[in-house]
Each structure stands twice: as C-alpha cells, then as structure tokens.
Image (spheres, helix red, strand yellow):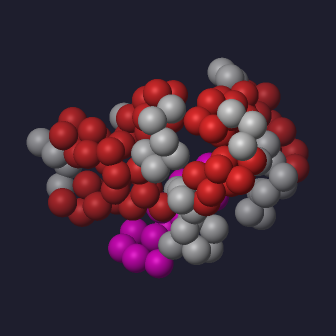
Amino acid sequence: RSSAASDVYKRQGINAEYGDPSFEVAKNELQSELSEEELQLVHDIIIYHHKITEFEGPLKEYVNAARKADWIDATQGIVRHGMSKSNVAKVMSTIPNNGFHQTLQDFGPRLHGSNVFKIVWEMSKIFYW
C-alpha cells in the first residue's frame, strides 16, 4: 500500500517531494494494523528509497533491500547493487513495468516543460546521501 500511495503523488505531478505525503497516507491506512516499529519501517522505506548511500538505522536490511531494488528498477539494471545481469533480466521479463519507466522520463517535463535546470533542481530534492 505504501508504494501505491507514492505512485499516486508521482502521477498527480504535484512535485517530486512526495515522500512525506505518501507516508501520511500509508500511516493513516496502516496504523491500526501495524506496530510502531513496522510503521517506522514503512516510513523509512518510503522516505529513503532514493537514498544514494546505505541507510543506517533500525531494520536497515529491509530498508536497503527496498532501496537497492528501487535503484535497480529505476535504472533498468544499469545500477545493479550486486545483482547479476541475468537475474535483473529475469525479474524485468517476469514483472511488467506497466509504463513505470515512461512515467519517470515524463515526470520532469510534466512539471517544468523543457527547463532542464528546474527539472534537475526538482529531482535533486528526492535524493539523500
């Protein structure tokens, strides 16, 4: 559910900083079902899935697994985080992207037209070191 909430904000094209609003949606939907620790995990996965370096914190192995999977998916396997090319290809052929990569390509221009500076500035807001 949390990734679906992220997708809603991305598709609406409000801005690139969809993490906090997505977590609030997920929290409202899941707080009666999950422990505080589980909600923190959902938060950390949503907020830090674009983190460039390793996440350090509680349940880091889960956050980093989601983070690495997102990087592999978003880069179409250019960034592989140790996953073999054959496994990346197997996953990509098994799970359809349903327009995900086209959505990524269209995201900046939908927000700022052909203004490359504004697109890069907007996208830089979603990455963490």
Name the residue rendered at 16%, 45% in the picture.
31
Question: For residue 113, what is the image quadrant?
Answer: top right
Q: Position of residue 32 (x, y in %)?
A: 12, 42
Q: Position of residue 125 (x, y in %)?
A: 54, 59
**Residue 108 in the figure: left or right of residue 35:** right
Q: State the image coordinates of residue 105 (x, y, percent, origin top left).
A: 73, 35
Camera-side residue of 102 and 59: 102
The picture quadrant where one finds residue 30 is top left
- For the N terminus, the image quarter is top left
Who's the residue at 62% across and 30% down the image? 110
Q: Is residue 66 magenta?
A: yes
Which of the image's four quarters has the C terminus?
A: bottom right
Taking the spot 62% from the left edge, 57% from the top edge, the residue there is: 121
Residue 36, quarter of picture = bottom left
Task: Inspect this view and state whether residue 65 appears.
Answer: no
Residue sticking out furthest to the right: 85
Q: Is residue 35 positioned above or below 101 on the image?
A: below
Closer to the camera, 76 or 87?
76
Report if residue 62 lies within the magenta region. yes
Res 125 seen here: yes
Main structural element of the magenta stretch: helix, strand or loop? Answer: helix
In the shown orientation, is residue 119 left or right of residue 88? left
Q: Which residue does the image show at 32% across and 45% down from the upper left? A: 21
The x and y percentages for residue 17 are 46, 50
Question: Is residue 58 placed above or below 39 in the rendered structure?
Answer: below
User: What segment carries the magenta color?
Assistant: 56-71
Indicate left or right for 83 with 112 as reference: right
